[in-house]
Amino acid sequence: MAPTVKVGETIPAGTFKYIPYTPELESNAACGVPVSLDITKDWKGKKVVLFSVPGAFTPTCHVNHLPPYLQKYDEFKAKGVDVIGVLASNDPFVMSGWGRFQDVKDKLLCLSDIGAEWSSKLGLSMDTPGGARTARYAIILDDLTIKYIEVEPAPGVSVSGADAVLAKL
Amino acid sequence: MTPPTPTLQAGDTVPDGTFRYIPYTEDLKDTVTQSLDITEDLKGKKVVLFSVPGAFTPTCHVNHLPPYLQHYDDFKAKGVDIIAVVAANDPFVMSGWGRFEGVKDKILCLSDPEAEWSGKIGLALDMSQLHFGIRTARYAMIIDDLVITYIATEPGPGVTVTGAEALLAEL
């Protein structure tokens, strides 16, 4: 699978639904209300690391892909990253639940690309029996320009992992 | 949104079908999904099955599932063999939600993909305009040796006739 956009191009517009982190969510007595993140508006002028997983709570994603991004949060911040986002095609409630399960708090935005709609614009979605899912990939954006875009060539985490992305910042 | 009406009632046999789920284990490897075959695995058993439109969504998360967990011993005292929660989310999400809620092996968290089985009973909800796809309605059943002895759908938002206390009163 190869992305249809490349380094140097402007990221396609799109919106993601997500539930912003608030301390009240910690008590698990609330589920929060989904809001929209507008790529062109909200990421203008920002340095963003976005990584995508095929599914919340699935093997690899859950154990190997997300946790290193959380562990290395300070290193990303030291390199001037404003926003770290994790993306999947699950709905925003599931993304929020997964984020709380992984205890990301406000460090990672857990974004819903429902139906893998935006990811398919980039040629980065895949068809599964359960519907379209986002592929496993990572992107670095600087003021809406793509600086890095890589999709995993095989099972496991390499070019889309935290270490690979940090090395490119 | 008017709630759907089930096409089956007390006295009918549940339709056949399969749910996917990840059985609870202490170290929970997340990797293996299993099938629960209704006719085979629920035969001869007393089952309480409740359905929610989505894992981690308001109401379901706060008001629907927790009372079933809290009343686990009461259900067992009434001879219930299996308590299960069903939603259209995939089995990984259902397993994650179950762990999040601390259900362990007390409640089976079952995936009814695209609400296929629930749809057989007229209990699927089309939420595609919200991009949520086809979901299961909020309903609950008591099944005794594959025969429905109680079936109800929530008439409005919130949890009443499909809640743990309502079901306990029917056992």
Image (cartoon, coloured by chain):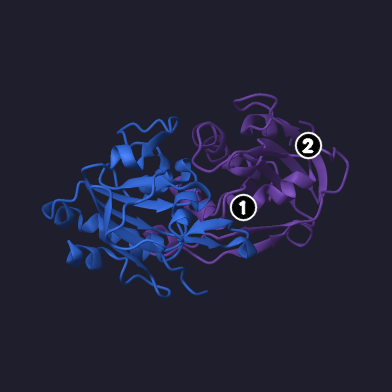
Chain colours: A purple, B blue
Can residue A37 be seen in this snapshot? yes
On the image, the x and y values in percent for residue B3 come to: 46, 71
Residue at left 65%, top 35%?
Answer: A136
Instruction: Say whether marks 1 and 2 touch (CB < 8 Å).
Output: no
| Chain of the residue that carries numbered disc 2 in the rendered image | A
Q: Where residue B61 sits in the image (x, y, percent)?
A: 39, 60
Q: Quick check: B65 above or below A86?
A: below
Q: Identify the residue under disc 2.
A: A148
The image quadrant that residue B49 belongs to is bottom left
Q: Is residue A58 above or below residue A47?
A: above
Mark earlier in primary sequence (1, 2): 1
Please state which of the two labelled residues, at mark 1 or mark 2, is closer to the viewer: 1
Q: Residue at (77%, 36%) from the top-left corner?
A: A149
Secondary structure beneath dot 2 equals strand
Identity of the residue furthest to the right in this view: A8
Farthest residue, direction front? B12
Both on one chain, marks 1 and 2?
A: yes
Q: Residue at x 67, y 39 (%)?
A: A127
Residue displayed at 46% across by 54% down = B120
Amino acid identity at mark 2: Tyr
Other residues around mark 1 within 10 Å, as few (<14) / some (14–19) / many (≥20):
many
Residue closest to the eye, A141 or A39: A39
Q: Specify the subunit that label 1 lies on.
A: A
Alpha-carbon neighbours of circle 2 within 10 Å: few (<14), some, or many (≥20)?
some
Which residue lies under the disc numbered 1?
Answer: A111
Q: Nearer the viewer, residue A67 or B125?
A: B125
Which amino acid, by three-letter code, is at mark 1? Answer: Leu
How far apart are labels 1 and 2 at the CA level? Answer: 19 Å
> Left of B116 or right of it: where is A38?
right
